[in-house]
Image: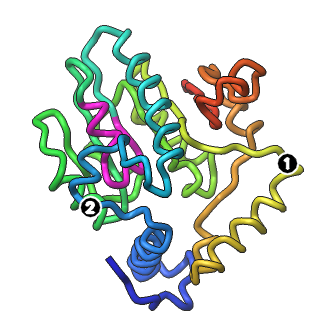
Amino acid sequence: MQLKNTVTDITPNNSATATEAFEEMYVAVRDKEGRLYTDKQLARLPDIEAGHRYYKEWKLRKHSAAQLIAFLEKRHRALNILEVGCGNGWLSAKLAAIPNAKVTGIDPNRIEIDQAKRVFKKSNLKFIHSAFNADSFEKGVKFDVIVFAASIQYFPVLKDVMKNAFALLNEDGRVHIIDTHFYHAAELEVAGERSLGYFAALGYPQMAQYYFHHLLKDVMHFRHKVLYDPTTLLNRLKRQGIFYWIKLKP
């Protein structure tokens, strides 16, 4: 899928126009990166052919997804699960295999959401094309688990997105963050320059203004439990994961 580079002067304050332009730009960037998958490939994710350019990345994501699913299965109860920023829906589909689970995936990218709906048809799985905020769901809807997998970086203020997430949790509900890099203060400037350079090389420098680098200390400010720490000696030796897995509660 090839999209013309028509996004040249958007800003985050152009409301509906900016939303549409961002979606077009986001999909174009994904295309340039080689991250748009055929329906056949998507149905198999996180398994992908060994020669694929992101084979090693998908191997890591397969491991983190398996850890999350195994953890949730141990709760041995019906779960209402929300994945925020579900993209093409592969993880939501895997979560829907948990016994007695009901899963909702939400994402503002219509192209990927439409593909998710087309590829993954399960009675306990649904996808919503929408931004994530306090008004994304009907009044009274609550979840036992809310998952952010490689999506937190698209939210500018961690405190605000967590406020919305916590408001949607049941009394004993929890938020899980996986497949996301967090930074120390000394790393932020370099990380920002690196992202700008990366997107500029793809032809879409504007994308950098929608990609946010969050501090590890900010996520640790919430009531939390680290379920996987990639910096421990044992985990560095195993090389099974490079991202934190953090569970949050209100």
Q: Residue at x 47, y 48 (%)?
A: 55
Horizontally, residue 47 falls left or right of residue 118, namely: right
Q: Quadrant of residue 68?
A: top left
The residue at which mark 2 appears reads as 38
Name the residue type under label 2. Answer: Thr
Labels 2, 1: front one: 2
Q: Residue at x 40, y 89 (%)?
A: 4
Q: Measured from the top left, where is residue 149 in percent x and y?
A: 48, 42
* Whether residue 234 is situated above or below residue 24 in the rendered picture: above
Q: Which mark is residue 151?
A: none
Name the residue type under label 1. Answer: Ala
Task: Check the picture and name the quadrant holding the C terminus.
Answer: top right
Horizontally, residue 57 falls left or right of residue 70, namely: right
SS category of the residue bearing label 1: helix
The residue at which mark 1 appears reads as 185
Q: Is residue 206 magenta?
A: no
- The span picked out in magenta is 82-96
